[in-house]
Image (cartoon, helix red, strand yellow):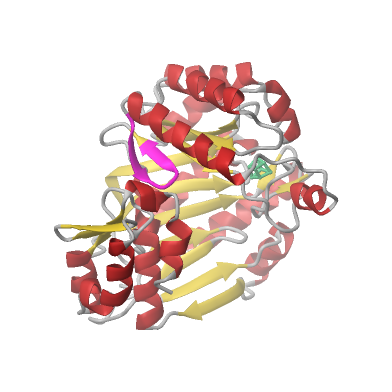
């Protein structure tokens, strides 16, 4: 159980804020601000709690602080918006501080339009072995609607450049159910994505989050989104296209060639512990979840002055941790909730704990029990939220 853990590093800067984005990301930061942030981040990583003793048996969060790190994920924001040499230095600091395993999956998120081959080569040489591009669409009009800074051609060139720089593990993010998006447009974007033959695809439905530009437009009745049936049809189209091209759906929104599942995100979905560094980053260690201050400037100041970095924190009860483990595990469409692992962690079998809920959804054809695995059926995937909510 939890023999290894993940490590997340947050780079909050973006060239421009996208209309739909509610991530902890900021545009307009330059030079000195970025340098100060990178210095603070380096300091925070160096002070990480790597010497925390192993957890007591029965700790709901399962410990994690001193365990080998087998995934490192630089996310944002746009990690590639800072100099590649800074990302390389930060990764070196992670390695000097935490027990990163030799075969660790080391990912950087990247946006087309923020890098060139020379930068990619610096990242590859530093040890990044996976790159995840936020492409979102190959439709010029939709890219504009989303406020993305790149063109479809730049996105394709970025993938080719990553291959040229010897990235053997490349992922693309795409979004559907976008304003005025048609089924034909989505099919075309999927086809263009599949033609790039990446190792992994993340295919997300747009969610309009409060506080975003899209939220304001929707409030004003100026965000013409596809209706629910069309959105469901787009999702089915994504599943069919990806599976037809040899990708397995292993999570509600994620598809991978064999062996190319995102190991870092698997830690989240299995509710494993993880380190988190940077403004707004979340760490989940020794049963406690702690989020750092969100503002890059306030975060940097707190690091510099030895102040408290905490924005929020909570220690989860055993019941809360079990519920989260169910909810997250059900996102994994093949593995589902591993009942044997759950039992080893909590001392109780989820098939007994949640017998009523499971029976209800099995009867409705939304859940299935396959050996030791409890998972959504293909129909249940479309009603995943309803099923997952029943366990919390
Ligand atoms: S590039 Fe990504 S993180 Fe940055 S604003 Fe756009 S969606 Fe948000």
Task: Judge from the rendering whether residue 258 lies leftward or rightward of residue 264; answer left or right.
Answer: left
Q: Is residue 347 magenta?
A: no
Tally of marks: 0
Residue 14 spot, x, y in % from top left: 69, 41
For the magenta stretch, what is the residue range? Answer: 247-255
Task: Report ligand 1 position as a quadrant.
Answer: top right
Viewer-closest of 119 and 241: 241
Residue 158 visible within the image: no
Q: Is residue 296 left or right of residue 222?
A: left
Q: Quadrant of the N terminus?
A: bottom left
Please provide percent x and percent y for residue 215: 76, 52
Look at the image and tell me whether residue 211 can be seen: yes
Residue 329 to residue 245: above or below: below
User: Which residue is depicted at the point 58% across and 37% down?
Assistant: 176
- The verdict on residue 253 being magenta is yes
Q: Where's residue 227, x and y in %?
A: 64, 43
Left or right of residue 182: residue 357: left
Q: Is residue 352 left or right of residue 17?
A: left
* Rendered image quadrant of residue 270: bottom left
């Amino acid at each position: 159980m939890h023999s290894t853990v993940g490590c997340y590093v947050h780079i909050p800067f973006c060239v421009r804020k996208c209309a739909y984005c509610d991530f902890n990301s900021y545009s307009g930061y330059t030079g000195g601000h970025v340098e100060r942030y990178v210095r603070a981040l380096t300091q925070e990583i160096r002070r990480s709690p790597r010497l925390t003793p192993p957890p007591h048996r029965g700790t709901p969060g399962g410990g994690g602080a001193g365990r080998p790190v087998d995934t490192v994920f630089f996310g944002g924001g746009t990690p590639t918006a800072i100099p590649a040499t800074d990302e390389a230095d930060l990764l070196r600091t992670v390695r000097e501080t935490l027990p990163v395993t030799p075969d660790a999956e080391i990912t950087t998120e990247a946006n087309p339009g923020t890098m060139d081959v020379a930068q990619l080569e610096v990242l590859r040489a530093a040890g990044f072995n996976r790159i995840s591009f936020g492409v979102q669409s190959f439709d010029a009009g939709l890219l504009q609607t989303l406020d993305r800074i790149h063109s479809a051609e730049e996105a394709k060139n970025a993938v080719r450049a990553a291959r040229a720089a010897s990235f053997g593990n490349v992922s693309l993010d795409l979004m559907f159910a976008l304003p005025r998006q048609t089924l034909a447009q989505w099919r075309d974007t999927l086809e263009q994505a599949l033609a790039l033959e990446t190792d992994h695809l993340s295919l997300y439905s747009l969610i309009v989050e409060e506080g975003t530009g899209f939220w304001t437009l929707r409030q004003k009745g100026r965000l013409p989104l596809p209706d629910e049936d069309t959105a469901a049809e787009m999702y089915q189209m994504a599943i069919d296209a990806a599976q037809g091209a040899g990708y397995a759906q292993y999570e509600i929104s994620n598809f991978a060639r064999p062996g190319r599942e995102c190991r870092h995100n698997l830690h989240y979905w299995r509710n494993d512990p993880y380190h988190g560094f940077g403004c707004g980053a979340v760490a989940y260690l020794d049963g406690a979840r702690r989020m750092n201050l969100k503002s890059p400037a306030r975060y940097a100041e707190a690091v510099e002055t030895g102040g408290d970095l905490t924005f929020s924190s909570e220690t989860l009860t055993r019941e809360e941790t079990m519920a989260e483990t169910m909810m997250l595990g059900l996102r994994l469409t093949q593995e589902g909730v591993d009942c044997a692992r759950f039992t080893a962690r909590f001392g109780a079998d989820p098939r007994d704990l949640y017998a009523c809920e499971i029976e209800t959804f099995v009867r409705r054809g939304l859940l299935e029990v396959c050996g030791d695995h409890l998972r959504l059926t293909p129909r249940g995937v479309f009603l995943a939220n309803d099923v997952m909510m029943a366990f919390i």
